Amino acid sequence: MTVLRSVQQVADIVSAALSTEYRVVIGIVGSPGSGKSTIAEQLVELLGTRAALLPMDGFHLPQAQLVELGRRERMGAPDTFDVAGFLGTLIGIRRGFGPSGHTIAAPGFDRALEEPVSGAIQISPEVSCVVVEGNYLLLDSDGWERIAPLLDQTFFIELDHETRLDRLVARHEQFGKSPAEALGWALGPDEANAVAIEQTAPRADYRIALG
């Protein structure tokens, strides 16, 4: 599998795949703290106005629903997302391109509140490339197996464990957790999810290893 060492290399590969006939959908995959959001944002910036970003985080189930289902303490696990809603949005994105297309609305995510925000993302029919970033784009179970076939190219981010852990702890602290809570969540639910996510790496078309 080809290993890419810069976001510019990713942008070059994606640019070569763009078409005026159909919309290209790109998947950026990685474990919590791997830098998915940053890399996806940089990629969209390099691609310019022809690209839009769709983070998977907007499809988290609402807090109240997670509490009702008894899954709040596992928030971020595969079964704490609206997979059907995510699938439907991706299908709409693939169909919504060009003169006969329409704007696709998708939820964003408020990290401070840890809640999805309905309609926060709007993808216009002129956009020829949508960059999707998330943990479970290559998972092959629990309904997630329907996602990968809707992605034209997939990129898995590699990052050493210690760097990833440090980033996760810092992020959790930034959004209100105490140092002990942040470390506990990073080593608990986040690490359990990371084990499952890392197993999907061989399904990606490319790997990204920066630094």
Image (cartoon, rainbow, N blue to C red):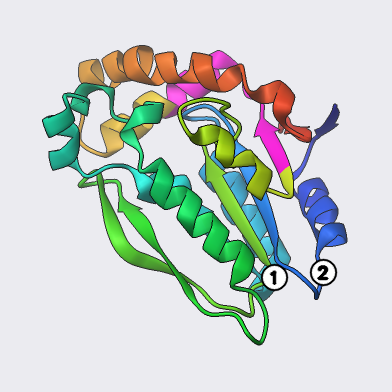
Quarter placement of the N terminus: top right
Give the crowd class for mark 2: few <14, some 14-19, many >=20 residues within 10 Å. Answer: few
Q: Amino acid at mark 2?
A: Ser
- Work out which residue is located at the far bottom of the displayed protein and give it: 99
Q: Secondary structure at mark 1?
A: loop
User: Which numbered marker is on residue 128?
Assistant: 1
Q: Residue at x 67, y 32 (%)?
A: 156
The answer to whether residue 30 is left or right of residue 21 is left
Give the crowd class for mark 1: few <14, some 14-19, many >=20 residues within 10 Å. Answer: many
Picture coordinates of residue 30, whole percent (x, y): 57, 31
Q: Is residue 76 visible?
A: no
The answer to whether residue 185 is left or right of residue 30 is left
- Assess whether residue 157 is covered by the magenta stretch: yes
Q: Residue at x 69, y 70 (%)?
A: 128
Picture coordinates of residue 23, whole percent (x, y): 70, 66
Q: Earlier in the sequence, mark 2 or mark 1?
A: 2
User: Which numbered marker is on residue 198?
Assistant: none
Region of the chain picked out in magenta, as a range = 154-167
Q: Amino acid at mark 1?
A: Ser
Name the residue nearer the viewer: 42 or 24: 24
Q: Residue at x 48, y 34 (%)?
A: 143
- Assess whether residue 8 is covered by the magenta stretch: no
Depicted 211 relative to depicted 54: above or below: above
Picture coordinates of residue 120, whole percent (x, y): 35, 66
Asked if labels 1 and 2 touch by Cβ distance under 8 angstroms, the answer is yes
Using the rendered view, name the quadrant where residue 78 is placed: top left
Depicted 102 relative to depicted 190: above or below: below
Quarter placement of the C terminus: top right
* Pointer 2 residue: 19
Report, in whole angstroms, how far the alpha carbon at label 2 lies from the one at label 1: 7 Å
